[in-house]
Image: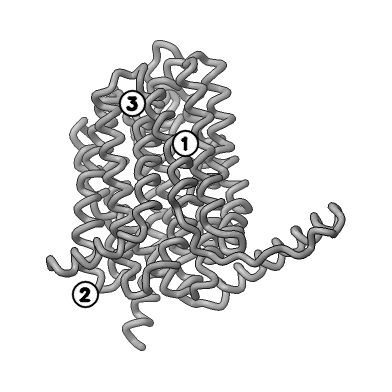
């Protein structure tokens, strides 16, 4: 056990200049999550605990982001394959600085609206794409048999960063949170620029004498061919087709829950940033254990597909408990299942990576992420109005978590394809 853990840690050594700035980036983002609910609610609905306007704007934001991410995520994955991982990472980690700078300056209603606009643009470029490009970077360096454990360590560090971010949010005064976050966010691209090595060899361009119009046409033509190539990579693999199905329905349910959960808890139980931080820390601390210690040990025994199936079952229980929460302690119980369902991400990355050649890592990861983005823009169209309705006095019946129960149906739908994949793999 000790030897396996040490081997997993050794695999991370070449990745230190990738993981350090990413961890700082995740800390900086997470420390703002719990306070954002209070800031947006106070600005848009002063003196109220329920703010349907904030729920609708968050849903609209997620829908717009999902629409554009369908194109942007696969495109960034292709660009990372063609032009290198480093420039795409520098682009994606830099975009988060500007929206939080607005809230550090002023938390008034006008600045909150401006924040939503800039944060939407930031999400379009960075949400999901940072992980996709980072996973492709890892696949360039780590051999196939050790990728699942390495992805477990990376997502474990992601959870550890969330714990540290929530600790800062829990104990820092609210007026300092955005300022500290900006300093950390600026550190990330500066560090990457100075220390991160490129893993993709790019060919020098020889068509510099061509006209601007022909250059634009050639770029669009290349992008179209590359997009078709991405579709073919997934379509020609039964494993990738099934994981695309699983990813769509999982993201449809889970992104819907994530978009409304904190507003639901604030309205139902009167939670504030302190309770939010405690719940998020509970998930984060357990996730560190499950991803860094359990996943590398269990994966060689049962494989990433079985782990993915168990994690999906845990996500269903997680959603149902939140939806039926009858007392303030139930959300803490529900959050404990995050220790297991958090394994969906690393096991999915491992399945995709092992089913794809080295030259197509960015394309496959980007295409699956694009499918997830389709789900993430559909879910708020249902979840936002449904949540607002059942949190209001006009609800047809008393079940404030009804929208979360509906999201659990989508999570259940993701299981059959994965079960079939497991059955076929054991048969062969």
The answer, for residue 405, to whether it is visible in the render is no
Which mark sits nearer the N-terminus, 2 or 1? 2
Whole-number angstrom distance, CA of label 2 to CA of label 1: 42 Å
Q: Residue 119 at what x, y percent from top left? A: 53, 33
Q: In this view, does 12 lie above or below 186?
A: below
Whole-number angstrom distance, CA of label 3 to CA of label 1: 16 Å
SS under mark 1: helix
Which mark sits nearer the N-terminus, 3 or 2? 3
Most extreme residue toward the bottom is 428
Quarter in which the N terminus is drawn: bottom left
* Side of 329 relative to 40 (left or right): left
In this rendering, the label closer to the viewer, 3 or 2: 2
Most extreme residue toward the left is 2
Determine the image quadrant of residue 172: top left
Which numbered tag is attached to residue 386?
1
- The residue lying at 48 percent from left, 42 percent from top is 189
- The residue lying at 39 percent from left, 11 percent from top is 47
Residue position marked by numbered label 2 in the rendering: 301
């Amino acid at each position: 056990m000790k030897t396996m853990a040490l081997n997993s840690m050794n695999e991370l050594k070449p990745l230190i200049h990738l993981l350090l700035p990413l961890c700082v980036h995740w800390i900086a983002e997470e420390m703002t999550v719990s306070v954002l609910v209070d800031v947006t609610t106070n600005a848009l609905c002063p003196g109220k605990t329920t703010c349907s306007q904030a729920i609708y704007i968050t849903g609209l934001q997620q829908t717009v982001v999902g629409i554009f991410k369908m194109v942007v995520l696969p495109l960034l994955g292709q660009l990372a394959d063609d032009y290198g991982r480093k420039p795409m990472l520098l682009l994606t980690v830099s975009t988060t600085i500007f929206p939080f700078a607005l809230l550090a300056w002023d938390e008034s209603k006008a600045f909150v609206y401006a924040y939503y606009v800039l944060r939407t643009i930031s999400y379009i470029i960075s949400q999901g794409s940072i992980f996709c490009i980072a996973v492709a970077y890892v696949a360039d360096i780590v051999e196939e048999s050790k990728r699942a454990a390495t992805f477990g360590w990376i997502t474990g560090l992601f959870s550890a960063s969330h714990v540290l971010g929530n600790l800062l949010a829990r104990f820092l005064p609210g007026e300092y949170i955005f300022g500290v976050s900006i300093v950390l966010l600026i550190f990330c691209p500066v560090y990457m620029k100075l220390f991160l090595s490129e893993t993709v060899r790019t060919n020098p361009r020889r068509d510099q004498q061509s006209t601007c119009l022909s250059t634009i046409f050639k770029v669009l033509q290349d992008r179209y061919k590359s997009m078709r190539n991405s579709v073919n990579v997934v379509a020609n693999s039964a494993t990738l087709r099934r994981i695309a199905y699983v990813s769509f329905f999982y993201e449809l349910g889970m992104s819907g829950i994530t978009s409304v959960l904190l507003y639901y808890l604030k309205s139902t139980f009167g939670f504030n940033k302190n309770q939010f931080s405690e719940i998020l820390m509970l998930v984060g601390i357990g996730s560190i254990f499950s991803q860094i210690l359990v996943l590398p040990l269990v994966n060689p025994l049962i494989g990433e597909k079985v782990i993915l199936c168990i994690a999906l079952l845990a996500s269903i229980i997680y959603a149902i408990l939140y939806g039926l929460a009858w007392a303030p302690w139930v959300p803490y119980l529900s959050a404990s299942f995050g220790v297991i369902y958090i394994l969906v991400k690393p096991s999915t990355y491992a399945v995709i990576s092992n089913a794809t050649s080295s030259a197509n890592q960015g394309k496959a990861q980007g295409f699956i992420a694009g499918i997830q983005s389709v789900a993430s823009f559909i879910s708020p169209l249902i979840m936002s109005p449904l949540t607002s309705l059942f949190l209001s006095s006009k609800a047809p019946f008393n079940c404030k978590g009804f929208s979360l129960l509906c999201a659990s149906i989508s999570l259940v739908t993701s299981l059959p394809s994965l079960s079939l994949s497991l059955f076929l793999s054991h048969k062969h």
